[in-house]
Image (cartoon, rainbow, N blue to C red):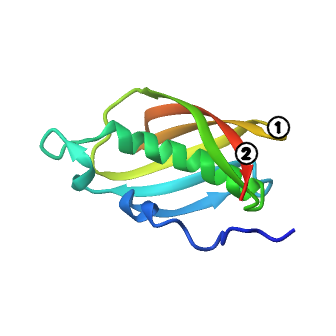
Amino acid sequence: MTSKLNLSEPPQFLSILGSKGFELSEDNESITMNFDVGEELTHSNGTIVQGGFITAMLDTSMAHLIIFKMNGEYNPLTLSINVTFLAPGSPGQFTASAKVDKLGKSISFTSANLHQHGKLIATATATNKLVKF
């Protein structure tokens, strides 16, 4: 089965989020993505990363996990995402870790955590519709 998506070329929006690569588990059941967020994605005089960008890091990790798990054959369109913000994030390094909770034929369920300096910043769960590319 050949991927319709070039999995070696990341989407351009990842550079806006400060993406610094990822590590996919051997069984494709989890992914860890690293980000280096600058002040341009903050509010409150450059001290707090805006919640939409926190959400984007979580959503990105969950979606990319499904894309890799499905060999680039399916686009995981987000039907719903629920984010819980636990602490403010400041400019700097973030790590998003995502896992597959359930994978059906046309729907996936994933969850993710976002950490900064070992502190849990936010959590998320998502439901995605799997659409062939």
The answer to whether residue 64 is seen in the rendering is yes
Q: Are marks 1 and 2 in contact (CB under 8 Å)?
A: yes
Q: Quadrant of residue 132?
A: bottom right
Q: Is residue 20 left or right of residue 87?
A: right
Which one is earlier in the sequence, the residue at label 1 or at label 2?
Answer: 1
Badge 2 amino acid: Leu
Tell how many labels: 2
Within 10 Å of the Cα at label 1, are there few (<14), some (14-19), or many (20+) other Cα atoms?
A: few
Q: Is residue 129 left or right of residue 10?
A: right
Above or below residue 105? Residue 38 is below
Q: How far across and how far down the image is residue 92, in percent?
A: 31, 53
Q: Which residue is mark 1?
A: 104
The structure residue drawn at horizontal position 76% and vertical position 68%, both measured from the top left corner, is 3
The structure residue drawn at horizontal position 73% and vertical position 45%, both measured from the top left corner, is 130
Q: How far across and how far down the image is residue 133, in percent?
A: 71, 59
Quadrant in the picture for the N terminus:
bottom right
Q: How far across and how far down the image is residue 63, in percent?
A: 61, 48
Q: Which residue is mark 2?
A: 130
Name the front one of labels 1 and 2.
2
Badge 1 amino acid: Gly
Q: Quadrant of residue 70?
A: bottom right
Within 10 Å of the Cα at label 2, are there few (<14), some (14-19), or many (20+) other Cα atoms?
A: many
Above or below residue 77? Residue 3 is below
The structure residue drawn at horizontal position 48% and vertical position 56%, both measured from the top left corner, is 34
